[in-house]
Image (spheres, coloured by chain):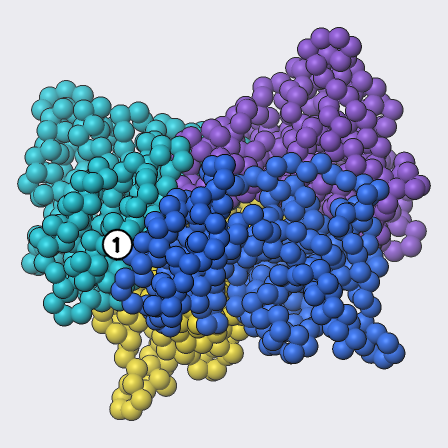
Chain colours: A cyan, B yellow, C purple, D blue
Amino acid sequence: MSASDAVRLPSPAPTGAAASPAAGEREFVLTLSCTNTRGIVHAVSGALLEVDADITESQQYDSPDTGTFFMRVEFHTPAARDAVDAALAPVGERFGMHLQLWDAAVRTRTLVMCSKDGHTLNDLLFQQRAGTLPIEIPVVVSNHLDLQPLASFYGVPFIHVPVSATGTQTKAAAEARLRELIEEFDIDLVVLARYMQILSDELCAELEGRAINIHHSFLPSFKGARPYHQAHERGVKLIGATAHYVTADLDEGPIIAQSVQPVTHAQTAADFVARGRHVEGNTLVQAVRWHAQHRVLLDGRRTVVFG
Amino acid sequence: MSASDAVRLPSPAPTGAAASPAAGEREFVLTLSCTNTRGIVHAVSGALLEVDADITESQQYDSPDTGTFFMRVEFHTPAARDAVDAALAPVGERFGMHLQLWDAAVRTRTLVMCSKDGHTLNDLLFQQRAGTLPIEIPVVVSNHLDLQPLASFYGVPFIHVPVSATGTQTKAAAEARLRELIEEFDIDLVVLARYMQILSDELCAELEGRAINIHHSFLPSFKGARPYHQAHERGVKLIGATAHYVTADLDEGPIIAQSVQPVTHAQTAADFVARGRHVEGNTLVQAVRWHAQHRVLLDGRRTVVFG
Amino acid sequence: MSASDAVRLPSPAPTGAAASPAAGEREFVLTLSCTNTRGIVHAVSGALLEVDADITESQQYDSPDTGTFFMRVEFHTPAARDAVDAALAPVGERFGMHLQLWDAAVRTRTLVMCSKDGHTLNDLLFQQRAGTLPIEIPVVVSNHLDLQPLASFYGVPFIHVPVSATGTQTKAAAEARLRELIEEFDIDLVVLARYMQILSDELCAELEGRAINIHHSFLPSFKGARPYHQAHERGVKLIGATAHYVTADLDEGPIIAQSVQPVTHAQTAADFVARGRHVEGNTLVQAVRWHAQHRVLLDGRRTVVFG
Amino acid sequence: MSASDAVRLPSPAPTGAAASPAAGEREFVLTLSCTNTRGIVHAVSGALLEVDADITESQQYDSPDTGTFFMRVEFHTPAARDAVDAALAPVGERFGMHLQLWDAAVRTRTLVMCSKDGHTLNDLLFQQRAGTLPIEIPVVVSNHLDLQPLASFYGVPFIHVPVSATGTQTKAAAEARLRELIEEFDIDLVVLARYMQILSDELCAELEGRAINIHHSFLPSFKGARPYHQAHERGVKLIGATAHYVTADLDEGPIIAQSVQPVTHAQTAADFVARGRHVEGNTLVQAVRWHAQHRVLLDGRRTVVFG
């Protein structure tokens, strides 16, 4: 959904692709989790052999705390999707797996929410266009108008959804509008790119595992508002950023990625804000990239990241 | 010099400013170097007291290898520039100083050169606009057309200067055009933002201390072409980027800033390229920011960075 | 105080010394703080010129939050200490400075407290012996006997001060013994090297600015007991260590140094413990080194580190 | 081989072990490589199922450059070693695998070579004793006597093998002695812990894949002698350390682990030496730990590290 007269950057071929499948082959990503027991890998690899799959990457993890086994396999096969599903179904049933088969050619449709600060939106849009972030961004939503030109430059529709305490723009109305947009644009993932409104508990629950936020601190330090000012007050010598799944408890959701940046006494809280920006951008893009590549699985309150 | 009908981002107030001078006061940065001896600090601080300067930051370094003393002072004063020059002149003469007084309100006019890869240009333009990079970018020059839309979005004139082996677009012709542009736009600094042409020895000499390049390796490893491929071949476990002043010896100039990024056996050379991008951007922006703030002084083949 | 028959490592000359003073000269470190105003640097440098001081390093900082000016100067001079004190006294008085003049040849006498975990004690003892940590360690104190052999190897007296709830070894008795040892050994600094007992509020107050603890998390995350287990529970992707001055509020004191280490879902809490060790050691040694070099000044709840 | 009257540190249980096998079960590590093709994982997991193996960790990698498949599996089984070998043999033959089965209870017998600088030897000895480095150190060899007390403290035999240009202590004689010791102590791995002699090409060839060196730079920068001085000369802003397998080409061997440390203009070459020490120690210990856990496989000139 691109505006035909928008100013466009050239779109180079995506980088980072694994060895391309041969003509006629399809590339898939399989993710699964189940109670750990013997025989899982043998059964899964057996099913993949049945469909002449060529495995290009495989990772697994056996969580001692929850007794859960996790696996992610990338493969290509001449078989049709139905055949792959059919080969995997008995295995999934036998082990009581939560199993998902992803078509690697289908990109994660991502709705980005932002407010006034555009640096993480800019990183997402640029990298998506440059081919280093394998998602689609069909729409940007914001409670302010400031970032509309940036979205337009990338040819992405920008929907202004203001939020105020009264009138027709209450949070409830804004969230209703958001749900409509998620449906209308067939959205897989919501990314809060320095979006300053707090989502309601209901919306958080509906978006469980499908909404990623970037918090500008090294969680669990400095939750909530103005983390850089809190950090400066505490006199820490490192500031950070955390990308995590959104849950009803603010800044408590499962962590996907974290980075830090050194600071000294000589930096003011405003300097922390300036310095923190590129760390926020990198951390959010990394988390979104991993999610889009189906590399992040949930293990209770934690994430398993097959990076 | 902004195109009135270009799509524009809002321009927030610059962050990171030190305590603002009072009304009627001017802010200056003083940088100096001279042979080390006693009494320098006393003389300099004395001269500044004469003009009622309020020092907001001061750093010094005494190089044991070259016997050179370096100093950088930020201050504001109600005095006019002439008065400050007059107070400092005898000190500069007494110690044989190379001394420069910069008006902190005057921004470094920066000409950015690029080719096809736009990520570092994007970082420079975005941060300049956002106020976190205190430079002016009056013009972008490129040997390709790919990045013209990006420059236009930021309202920056884009000059296409192709380079080919024969005809009217030889390197010599291109460099002559560059010199004209440097003069026409009153340029202080040239930044090579993944510009793929190698500058001639003459041009390097003319631009000594005024041209910054970003090389996508951790120098002195992997000079020259395709450093990520060289790095991959060698099997290093960290890739990096180096921002340095340009000299006639390719990738040999004084280093300003360096960063690294971990990699594993599982990443291909193409992955190195993708991963390296944000490190290149951060490193180049950091070096340009420090240069624009007059924080980088040359000490032989090395830099003194009063960061 | 070295046991003549202890197994001893050779003691190489200290590294990292600045340009040595000439014969007959003394090396000093001056630290000072006062309300910020004009003329401080001019006055201090003037006083130092009076005693023919050769400044080898000088750093200053002007805290916008507290309005406090901090300075640290390293210099050598042919003058006697009395003369230097006399030259500085009027300056100190004029600006209401908290001023301290340190003889650089006099090492910080450090009492190290430990329990069962010996890795940070090992780092401190080794680096002190190797000359890379400019302190004296006249005594090690522990509530267990496990680390006595390690102290003996380095020829350092080991005093066993057990702590139990009742009988003669209560915490109060142990702290009384500690005070005696601090007096007896003329101690300047107490370092808690994974010492597992919590100091009383009174003792913390007495040791204000003179006791450094290493906490095995990135504060303010995971205060108190078993921080690696808390970190594992939360699913963070970085673990850390924080060296800070001890105050009555557990793990709340001014931070001197912090470092982090990446972890993944595949590491257990026990792995966090193993991985965190070298970060704890480096961070504690760095903080102790800076303190011993008089590079750490207190600015309210934060530290100014002239590293 | 411990001296009964040596001063000994207590020996806590090793940390970092995976879920312990049940009574009567044995723990193994399987590593293999072969030309990549379909069916490998299915065949290997099938063989392991035959012996009722419980897989605790499994990693694989498919090298696009060399077409080689690598795998490492940790498992425990009630079966005897013979049975496991028998189950795996047909799989190894079918795929032309280079396959090794390691008993996880058997530690890598490591001969450490050192000269005068003891910090990396100290890290190896301490961590081995503390249980965080799963190796045996039956003997330390040195061309100097300086570090004998340190080895004695840990109860490790210390063999002095001086090297000089003439007389009976030529390099050839020293290397002959080393070969004897490798045989006598049944050595699996030689670690050069800042050992300053260069091994002959013949010895390097004999020790291929079994000798690890720590070079105090970020290779391939600054090979050879005095890398910190070379680094200081070049004015880099990061110094580093590289642990690699030893080959006949000095500092050219496959890299296992690398780390960096920031430096500024204010540090002298001697400061680089002091600062670099802990990075060298951590990097060497990490490489030795991975090797001892059979996590490092050779892929041409590079390593695959299943960390």
Can residue B55 be seen in this snapshot?
A: no
Estimate the x, y position of residue C268 in percent, counting from the top left. 46, 38
| Front one among D160 and D249 | D160
- Picture layout, residue C71 above or below residue D168: above
* Residue drawn at x 66%, y 15% as measured from the top left: C201
* Residue drawn at x 68%, y 77% as measured from the top left: D200
Is B269 placed left or right of D113 in the picture? left
* Residue drawn at x 18%, y 40% as measured from the top left: A93
Is C156 placed left or right of A99 in the picture? right
Is C274 placed left or right of B95 in the picture? left
Estimate the x, y position of residue A125 in percent, counting from the top left. 23, 52
- Picture layout, residue B220 above or below residue C215: below
Estimate the x, y position of residue B287 in percent, counting from the top left. 47, 58
Q: Quadrant of the N terminus of chain C?
A: top right
Chain for mark 1? Answer: A
| Front one among B169 and C52 | B169
Q: Quadrant of the C terminus of chain C?
A: top right
Q: What element carries label 1?
A: helix
Disc 1 marks a residue whose amino acid type is Ser
Can residue B250 be seen in this snapshot?
A: yes
| Front one among B242 and D63 | D63
Q: Residue furthest bottom?
A: B166
* Residue drawn at x 30%, y 49% as measured from the top left: A41
Query: Which of the 4 image quarters holds residue C225?
Result: top right
Query: Which of the 4 image quarters holds residue D8?
Result: top right
- Picture layout, residue D235 above or below residue C298: below
Mark 1 = which residue? A45
Estimate the x, y position of residue D260 in percent, counting from the top left. 55, 56
**For the residue carrying disc 1, how many other residues have a C-alpha within 10 Å: few (<14), some (14-19), or many (20+)?**
many
